[in-house]
Image (cartoon, rainbow, N blue to C red):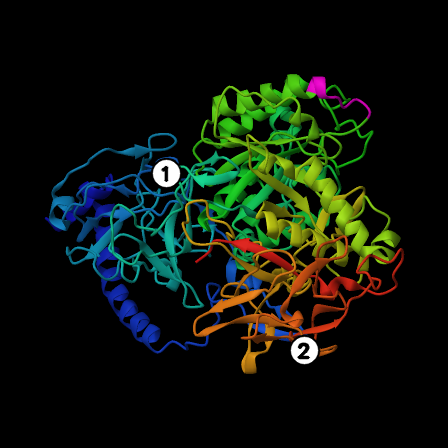
Amino acid sequence: MEIQESLAAAQIPTFSDALENAQRVESMKSQLQAFQTRKRDASSSRNLEIPREDVPPSKVGRRAGEVQLSLPSAHMARKPARTIIRGTQIDREPSRKIPRESQGLTPHLTYYQLASCPKNQRRESASQQMDKDVSKQIKEGGNRPRALARTYAIHGQPSSESTRGIEGPYDANVLDADTATGDGLPVALTRECLTGQSAWELAPNSQFQLASRDDYGNDLCLEFNPYYSKRILTSKCIVPEEDDPQNPQGQCKSLPLSTSSRWILDDKTGSRVKLTCVNWVGHLEPLIVEGLQKKPLPYIVDNVALMGFNCVRLTWATFMFTRENYGNLTVRESLNQLSLDGSVAGIAMNNPQLLDATVVEVQKAVVYELGRKNIMVILDNHVSKPQWCCGGDDGNGFFGDEFFDPKEWLQGLTAVANLYKDAPNVVAMSMRNELRGPRQNTNDWYEYIPQGAAVIHGENPSLLIIVSGLGYETDLSFVKEKPLVLNFTNKLVYEAHWYAFDTPWQIWLSQTNQICAQRSQRFADHSAFVVSSSNPVPLFLSEFGADQRGGNEADNRYLSCLLAFVAEHDLDWALWTLQGSYILRQGVVELEEVYGMFDVNWDHIRNSTLSRRLQLVKQIIWDPKSNNTTHSKLYHPQSGLCAQIGNNGSVRGSDCQSPGRWKQQEAGSSIQLEAEGTFGCLRAVGDGQPATVSSDCGNQTTLWKMVSSSQLHIAAQGGYLCLEMNSSDSVVVTRKCLCLDENSNDVPNCAENPEGQWFKLVPTNES
């Protein structure tokens, strides 16, 4: 009887085949029970010091005031892939009911993790699940039977502890099993059915996620990828606090987004969502994102999250979606036609599953992988023809240029908006990067920008529409007189760029206060005014950045100036850039990107101090829903620290998560500190002495005003002593104001660096 049931379940055409298969199953059951016993015993005694990718990386001292962030080892995220199971026959629901079959094995319910919150499902008991008979056969190619991926229980009992390998599409005469190949990689078929990666059990604290354990002790769960060839992957298990069949992967972001006044909001809750993004380039000649030849895709994405970014501005070229000779290329073909043999070898080693995928499929895989880590994506149409951006005469600058046909541009926007309409982590599209060149004019801007917005919104109405101005995204001033009119509401966001290189570096060094004041005022007048106009709109600072090697003094001062402005106005932003190198840029193979977060080999963060400098601007400084009273954070942009009370009443820099609460009623008055058990006023003791907090708030040493044109020097009354942060120990002291005369005015030229004396009282209603 058992053999007959086995025959019926597997649809084996001959009795001898059925007998052989049933005998193999019985043998495997006993072997697997012994194996699982050994595995559990080994797991219980596993060395807890084994490194895991989900553990925050260690921090190693680099030099005074700087830390080196070590990134996870690449080999932890990569294992060689074998035959890949295509998931076209797998339902995208979070659960799949499977036929009741006998063969000494009982089918059990399988849940697939999705990057987005799964659809609501009614929970059924185990007995109800197994009583349902869903006998639909799934076939793929010819008449050979294909089985859904399924889990089984040993000895006919529900699978509460362990299972044998999952059967995939199979030949009736071959007993294969699925094996986990690594985090973010497709599962593969193997005949090595008793290896660690082909043994599966329910994930800890979950009744719905099927897991296999890798060599490093990580539990990897099955996950269905609907965006890249509909493959079944394994990924690090995400288990909710309470086992909930309606949400087997835990808390998801509530998307899409909308706008209200100058803020970007969660469309469902009305809470503010602040975009703190990094740019990731994918618009150059190879047509794929940078870094895939250096590291596995999950490794790169994991470290985007570790760096603290919640969003990626992903660049793309129009031709990739409008011309078949671009979009239909596989990665191998694209690289081969550019004679990039080294990059082919690098991707074959680090991302073998992507090498023979099309460039469009790879972009989808990147978007999906970012979604797995709850990282939002902004799709930025950077250029039309794939190439480095941006020259004034490169043919990509403005409507009607050689490669910038408006109709083709609209076609590309339509295709991309449609492609990602089911990708919940794609929250916005930026219509075009850095409009520029001799042809640029406002008449064409007002003609084509509404058309681009309309086609995106028509295809994917959930997306935010991000609009750039003119002059390399430095000028939106023309919308003051003639606001942009669109056929939808609550989706418009403007964007702008701000770099140091539009000003000679000598001026940044000799007239630091003056040029900071001038550039800040220009940015306010030409771009940031949109957040404070009579009809405010969010502003996304979609590009800024600096040479992260640290030796470019002009860039260093520019960045402090910019961060003070961004913190004061609490702008959304995207740093340029993630990549530490380029596959091919401007004819140079493996060109280093010194603005990149990664180093040239993608092994480490290039400059760990930048993450600290960004810590305040990553926070929601102003919450439009909050009713808390307003106070200020005393922010030092050069270090990224905020001032708070220290030992013995001294003031020192600390992280900006829980800094001191400072208040100044008016210019020239005292700066009061409100803290639990402490009340007093900031006091200047003397030149070179630590600033303190004093209960005597009425004398001249506790009265402060902003001086210098930058409005970043905070000077005690009289203007002689300014706040300064010691680079060695982060103690806030007072010293003679730098680059100012006796009347607190800027000197025409100054050889000193006043950056260490720059502070900003940043208003916040954060609790």
Where residue 439 appears, as percent x and y from the top left, is 79, 22
Residue sitting nearer the eye, 34 or 619: 619
Comparing labels 1 and 2, the label whose residue is closer to the camera:
2
Q: Secondary structure at mark 1?
A: loop
On the rendered structure, is 151 left or right of 561? left
Is residue 286 among the parts visible in the rendering?
A: no
Magenta residues, start to end: 438-444
* Residue depicted at 27% across the width and 66% down the height: 31
Q: Amino acid at mark 1?
A: Lys
Where residue 249 appears, as percent x and y from the top left, is 34, 51
Q: Amino acid at mark 2?
A: Val
**Mark 2 lies on residue:** 685
In the image, which disc is placed on residue 268? Answer: 1
Establish if 573 lies above or below 713. above
Where residue 509 appears, as percent x and y from the top left, is 85, 57
Where residue 731 appears, as percent x and y from the top left, is 64, 75
* Residue depicted at 60% across the width and 55% down the height: 666
Is residue 749 covered in magenta? no
Q: Residues within 10 Å of mark 1 (few under 14, many from 20)?
A: few
Q: Residues within 10 Å of mark 2 (few under 14, many from 20)?
A: some
Is residue 441 covered in magenta? yes
Which of the two discs, 1 and 2, labels the residue nearer the N terminus? 1
Establish if 449 lies above or below 252. above
Q: Secondary structure at mark 2?
A: loop
Q: Quadrant of the C terminus?
A: bottom left
* Residue depicted at 72% across the width and 65% down the height: 757
